[in-house]
Amino acid sequence: MKNIDIQRKYAAFIDYFEQAMPIAESELKYENPYQLIVAVILSAQCTDKRVNMTTPALFERFPDAKSLSEASQDDVYQLIKSISYPNNKAKNLIGMAKALVTEFDGVVPSNLDDLQRLPGVGRKTANVVMAVAFDKPAMPVDTHVFRVSARIGLTHGAKTPLETEKQLVEHIPQNILSKAHHWLILHGRYVCVARKPKCEECGIKDICDFYQKKVK
């Protein structure tokens, strides 16, 4: 019975968002895979809005991996110092760019293993690049996806992002996997917020474990 319940929950979740949010995209501004991977590295523990305010000057100064690979850490730091952890991110950005130039001829790879070889690129960032830049089926799990999927009851007992990713991938069709990632992020960012979720505004509260427990 539990499997039937979870299948119905996923079906209702997908049906609602297909109607309410048929187009769901990243809020990061980018023009190519290089710009996206830079923006995603910068977005760790930082808002997309802040990243979007910072990247235009960075991309003007360093328009490709080669130019960024030749930058000094201080030059990059000065351009991203308004973002969280600027020293570490400046180091990672330059390291990532150097690896792109030396290992991939300056071209951002499109598969998970190669992406994770780049400094500053973990599984979540690699999945974002695959999903957003290359339109490949992937489920990046950030804090919003982790929280929202557990609250709704799409995942159960997942203690790590990887466990959450595996459960979501098991139940969501590949052809909408990347879009479902954005559904969960945007729902978590604007409705199912961390401290005081806006349950009364939520269109899926009828299938949400958190809300059902709240109203009992």
Image (spheres, helix red, strand yellow):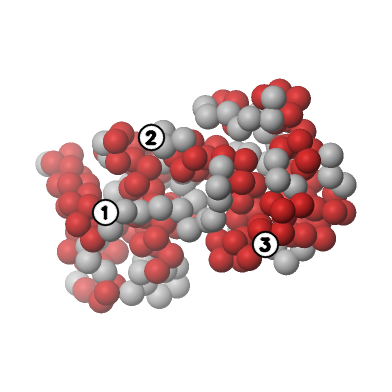
Which mark is on residue 141? none
Looking at the image, which is closer to me, 69 or 199? 69
The label number, if any, that marks residue 22 in the structure image: 1
Task: Give the image quarter of residue 119.
Answer: top right
Q: Position of residue 196 (x, y in %)?
A: 40, 75
Three-letter code for the amino acid on which mark 2 is drawn = Pro
| Classed neighbour count for the residue bearing mark 1: other residues with Cα under 10 Å, few (<14), some (14–19), many (≥20) | few
Q: Position of residue 43 (x, y in %)?
A: 60, 55
Q: Is residue 103 left or right of residue 206?
A: right
Residues at discs 2 and 3 in contact (Cβ within 8 Å): no
Contact? badges 2 and 1 (CB < 8 Å): no
Residue 128, given in percent of the width and then of the height, sits at 50, 43
- Mark 2–mark 3 Cα distance, whole angstroms, equals 29 Å
SS state under label 1: loop
Along the viewing direction, whichever of 213 and 18 lies nearer the viewer: 18
Within 10 Å of the Cα at label 2, are there few (<14), some (14-19), or many (20+) other Cα atoms? many
Q: Residue at x 74, y 29 (%)?
A: 101
Q: Secondary structure at mark 3?
A: helix
Q: Amino acid at mark 3?
A: Thr
Looking at the rendered structure, the secondary structure element under dot 2 is loop
81 horizontally vs 25: left or right: right
Q: Indicate the position of residue 185 as horizontal and vertical percent values.
A: 41, 56
Q: Residue at x 25, y 76 (%)?
A: 200
Quadrant where the C terminus lies? bottom left
Q: Nearest the camera: 112 or 98? A: 98
Q: Residues within 10 Å of mark 3 (few under 14, many from 20)?
A: some
Name which of mark 2 and mark 3 comes first in the sequence.
3
Residue matched to label 3: 54
